[in-house]
Image (cartoon, helix red, strand yellow):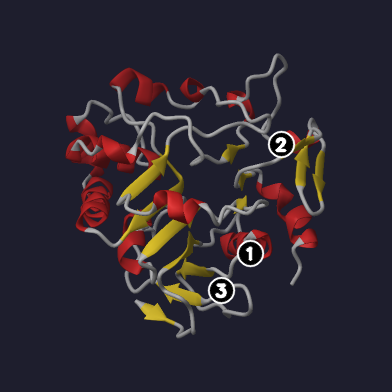
Amino acid sequence: MKTEEAAINNKKGFLILAQNTPDTNYTRQARILARSIHRSQSEPIGVSVVVDEDIPKGEDFDCVIKLSEDDAKLEKWKIHNKWRMWELSPYEKTLWLDSDMVVPVDISWWWDELDGIPIRFCTRPVDFQGMAIRREVYRKVWVEHKLPMVYTGMVYFDRSFTSERMFKTAKVVFREWPTVSKEFGIANQNVTGDLAFSLAVKILRDYRAVPEVDDFFKFVHMKPKAFKMPNSINSNWADSLSLIVDGNILIDGKIQKYPLHYVDKELVHIFEEHLRS
């Protein structure tokens, strides 16, 4: 691990994994996310990024962490290092977010709510209307095999043995996917971060990490097929729904009250324009 030194409070902070592909500049997305965090939070907070290439820290990141080993080096979809987030985080308490997100609201109070919880996955994302998404649309394998509804778009963890064990179990699942997936009867599925951690939860039987409760720990998931709407919307959802980005983020006239997983990479320039440093 190669880390740029920074004078940060290592007690708590946000962590982002950003490995670029030929199609997508994830480090660009990570900078936009970092800027949204710095602007929206009522108290100073650290933001660190995990990368596979040298990038300038700038004013966006307190810490740039370069992978010394890369399980995703030969992969088109760079999700195979997600199990490393526990060992790479510079914080005692970490909120790990996907890079294609922005945080438009102050969630500083979450840290107190999460205090004492070793690890917590988001299990109930909502749509832009604030309604629980139709999870079964993209999650047939979860429903059929009764897997925990893990969404690694947003994960909280501390430095405890409990959270370390979860990530180490996910490591085995990632690296031994052909064997593990066969044991669980899903050998026809490609590994994803959500699936790997779902199986880790099931292997460890640590269902405290995935409580099926409708509380604050959720993000807005902009996958249109999961919206509870009478009319279908394609993946480029901004073609059908209005998007206004100013001090708030409004989608179809509705203010977004949770971290926003915008998914559609074509929207990067809109958020970037508003969040220029």
- Name the residue at 53% across, 22% down: 134
Give the label, 1 or 3, closer to the camera. 3
**Label 1 – label 3 distance at C-alpha:** 12 Å
Which comes sooner in the sequence, label 1 or label 3?
Answer: 1
Q: How crowded is mark 1: few (under 14 residues within 10 Å), some or many (20 or more)?
A: some
Confirm whether residue 267 shows in the render.
yes
Q: Which amino acid does label 3 sit on?
A: Phe
Q: Is 72 situated above or below 213?
A: below
Q: Residue 3 versus residue 212: which sits nearer the camera?
A: 212
| Numbered disc 2: secondary structure | loop
| Residue 185, picture quadrant | top left
Q: Residue 229 versus residue 268: which sits nearer the camera?
A: 229
Query: Which residue is denoted by mark 2 in the rendering?
Result: 236
- Label ID, residue 61: 3
Query: Which residue is denoted by mark 1 in the rendering?
Result: 28
**Label 3 – label 2 distance at C-alpha:** 29 Å
Q: Residue 126 versus residue 107: which sits nearer the camera?
A: 107
**Label 1 – label 2 distance at C-alpha:** 19 Å
Would residue 116 appear left or right of 126 to someone viewing this image? left
- Name the residue at 72% across, 34% down: 237
Q: What residue type is labelled 1?
A: Arg
